[in-house]
Image: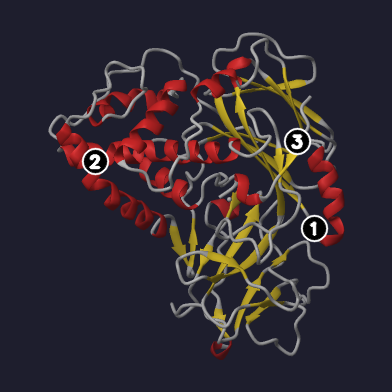
Amino acid sequence: MRPAAIISLAAFLSASCASIDMDSSKPPRPQCAATQSEAEAIRKAFFFGYPVYEMSRMRQRTLSLPGARPNSLLHRTRLSGPSDRSITMPNTDTLYSTAWLDLSGGPLRFSIPEMGTRYHSIQLMDPFSDVFAILRNETTKAREYLIVGPDWEGEAAAGATVIASPSRDVWLVGRTFVKGPGDLAAAQELQQAYTIEETGTLAAGTLAADTFSEAQIPKTPSAQEFLSVVNGALSRGPVRSIHQKRLGCFARAGIGPASDMAVQVPSPGIKKVWDTALGQLFIDTKEALENSGTLRNGWRYPASNIGQFGEDDLYRSAIALGGLAALPTQEAINPITTRDANGDTLNGAFRYRLPIPADVPVDGFWSLTLYKSDGAGRWFLHENPLDRYAIRSTNGGLVRQPDGTIILEISHQRPPHHLNWLPAPKGPFLLVFRAYRPQSAFARGHFVLSAVKRLSDY
């Protein structure tokens, strides 16, 4: 059993068991548009491959840390604060844990201690960033899982639940709820009790070590770097059938397993199109992120297929750019807003109110977190005299209306009654409402958050 390492959030995070498609039969011949231009072929190939690139980049960053290796847990043992600038919009509700699993050496045994009613989730993702399983507290008792690769045949030990991975490489991200500063030590103790144990005969990480490049994978790659990283990751296979059946369409653009002779070495003309198009493709991905989902009362809700994208390569790429490791909507829904009820930009120079009803339909909990802009498109926690960065449904001391509604005050200047006050900066800010374990009313849009209103509008 391998001890877990403790690292900073910057090191490994930039952010019910789902059914999976394990069909290993020969995929049908892809229906490709023979008349599509080289530019269009490359555009589609980019959106197909970009999530794989970002997952590879995250893997490289994590496994390059001192002492890090496949099949070992790394823990973030404190909550984020204003000084944390490694990722945008950090979560202040949970401690994070992470591991990159290599199933080429055989199954892994993953154990969760007795958690009681404490919220936690263990998210498992394939190399395309699709979530294929979430391990969570369906019971308060300790649990044991056997995570197996696509080639595994056998039986699990009594009491262990088999989790079948569609790929040999898996990214594990764990979240453990912390109620507040006084609860941190208890949450850390439970977090440290998560364990990974290797059960195979092949030394775990052998294949990963052989195929893992020590070279830094750049955030903004050249065309050659992009193709090399994506094709190298695809070579570790197998690829889920939903992607395998489309791989043939991208061979012309140079995308596919590096060992696949059908993948064409890009011609000088194709390489030139790649080099010319790459910058615009990143811009298009950013625009897709900004316009994704559904707008309701000024809040932008994620699309229903977030985390389990199917063939929606553009949305998968958008989330890979701005929200890698996003949870599916059955586990969390995180609406975001930068606008008030009139469509004006939220700014701490004004005072706002946001009513949160008593009956928010969640089985977990909810939180509202405020972030300030750095002026360059990134958002961080705002330092304030209360050290209050979020308000949660689990907070004590909140003032409630007779019907249970919580009316939040949001402003830079302290209001006369500050028990429900969420401090804001003097300038622009952004709000994220996180609903953990949303009920169907939330997931289906029957429950919608109220718009944020300026105080003068009351």
Mark 3–mark 1 Cα distance, whole angstroms, equals 23 Å
Q: Horizontally, is 379 left or right of 39 in the view? A: right
Location of residue 288 with respect to 381 vertically, above or below: above
Residue depicted at 80% across the width and 61% down the height: 180
Pointers 3 and 2 in contact (C-beta within 8 Å): no
The percent coordinates of residue 339 (x first, y second) are 48, 74
Residue depicted at 46% across the width and 78% down the height: 345
The percent coordinates of residue 149 (x first, y second) are 58, 19
Tell me the crowding category of disc 1: few under 14, some 14 to 19, or many 20 or more residues within 10 angstroms, Cα based: some
Residue 4: mark: 3
Question: In the image shown, does 38 or 2 lie closer to the viewer?
Answer: 2
Pointers 2 and 1 in contact (C-beta within 8 Å): no
Residue at numbered disc 1: 179
User: Considering the image in quadrants, where does the N terminus appear?
Assistant: top right
The mark lying in front, picked from 2 and 1, is 2
The amino acid at mark 2 is Trp
Residue 218: mark: none
Question: In the image shown, does 9 or 358 lie closer to the viewer?
Answer: 9
Local secondary structure at mark 2:
helix
Residue at numbered disc 2: 274
Query: Would residue 40 be seen by someone viewing this image from the given angle?
Result: yes
The quarter of the displayed image where residue 271 is located: top left
Badge 3 or badge 2: first in the primary sequence:
3
